[in-house]
Image (spheres, rainbow, N blue to C red):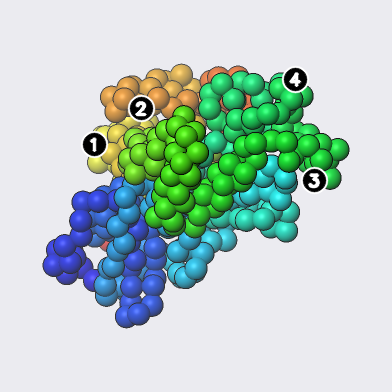
Amino acid sequence: MNSQQLKKIGLPDKPGVYFFKSGKSILYIGKATSLRDRVRSYFSKDLISTRGPMILDMTVKADNVEWQETDSVLESLILEANLIKKYKPKYNTKEKDNKSFNFVCITRDKLPRALVVRGRSLNKKEYSKVYGPYPNGLQLREAMKIIRRIFPYIDNDSAKKNNTEFYKQLGLVPKIENAPQNNLNFSRLTLKGSDTDKNFNNFASLKEYKNNIKNLKLFFEGKKKSVVINLKKEMLSFAKKKEFEKAGEIKKRIFALEHINDIALIKGEIFGSRTSEYSIEAYDVAHMGGKNMVGVMTVIENGEVNKNEYRKFIIRTQDGANDTGALEEVLSRRLRHIEWGLPSLIVVDGSTAQINVVKRVLDRYQFVIPIVGVVKDERHRPKAIIGDEVIIKANKKDILLVNNESHRFAITFHKQKRNKNFLS
């Protein structure tokens, strides 16, 4: 498939999920803030450097693109996860198998909790429902914030005795009416077999909370229309009983569902699918006397190297052995590609001079990302890490690993370029 064929399809400028297909077979499923813009990005000239050889191979094999519109980016996030789980497309293998991804889990308690659980610690038998995986942890956290304001639920933090009142004032946990307020401890109420089980029938709003959880499950199953129908029934029921305050609350929920505020999720979509919690990028430059100068970017995500995200740069603007100038060029070119995602930390090989270059480029692009520098001895072995001490202490192992990877990758790329030029 090529860009000319794509123009004939007429993709809309709306959120949704897209399918790259070969015949009837689905090769890849993705979500988008704008279906038109996102699918177009797969046919850019620098696809292999921005998305890697696997995705390039997928676009070559695809002969058609289909899509399904959603009312919001939030719904596209949920729909994407459900469809990947259902169809298991070949080129979504990474999303399907990576145990560092997140799942939304509903517990089996009397007052069920909604939790975000990492794949590596997930035991599905412990939960009544499990949704996911969700590749983008940042977007999932923003999604849960939006959903929780529509359907307040209990999680592990709000179940703690000292936190209950705080979360209740924020409207993020259910209001349990007719409960002994001095003994309203969600951590006890949610335990299976608790001594408080006999008191559950005294809670007038227990049924309402269970309806919340039921609607939450339906929403994560992509059944928003069913959720709206359920809420309208609840609203009418309260209105008939002249419980107009409760009917008004339900009306607000319906409005919120039909007018979901996607601002935070749209930001996450613009910054790409690779924005994640422990994502670290390292940069290094290699040359010999200023000749055959190259730069590289290496990536660690959640403690593991991700070679699919490594990038190579042939230095174009520098004459002579100007390492800081080359680093500035690499960072400037990299930050033009916000579709690659943004890291939580940048690591450079060097000291204050290199850190100042990165700060200057980040200021130019108006990004705020922490930076650390790995200082080397005369044998190019790490002897110090400079930067924020808290960040260094929390990430020392990953910083050294990604820095070592950038040095190795830069030397390898430089040798390849030098040998190619020598042979030509």
Of marks 2 and 1, which one's residue comes earlier in the chain? Answer: 1
Which SS class for mark 4?
helix
Q: Nearer the viewer, residue 198 or 288?
A: 198
Label 4 sits on residue? 182
Q: Can residue 196 be seen by looking at this rendering?
A: yes
- Looking at the picture, which amino acid does disc 1 mark? Thr
Snapshot quadrant of residue 98 = bottom right
Residue type indicated by callout 2: Phe
Pointer 1 or 4: first along the chain: 4
* 389 and 356: which is toward the camera: 389
Nearer to us: label 2 or label 4 = 4
Front of the two marks 3 and 1: 3
- Taking the image as shown, residue 304 lies to the left or right of residue 226, namely right
Q: Earlier in the sequence, mark 2 or mark 3?
A: 3
The answer to which of marks 4 and 3 sits earlier in the sequence is 4
Looking at marks 3 and 1 on the same chain, the residue that comes earlier in the sequence is marked by 3
Disc number for residue 359: none
Q: Residue furthest right?
A: 195
Q: Is residue 125 above or below residue 242?
A: below
**Label 1: few (<14), some or many (≥20) within 10 Å?**
few
Per the rendering, the mark at residue 317 is: 1
Mark 2: which secondary structure?
A: loop
Q: Which mark is residue 192?
A: 3
Mark linked to residue 367: 2
At horizontal 68% and vertical 48% (from top left) the residue drawn is 107
Give the Cα distance between marks 2 and 3.
47 Å
**Amino acid identity at mark 4:** Asn
Is the residue 349 above or below the residue 301 in the image? above
Q: Nearer the viewer, residue 147 or 40?
A: 147
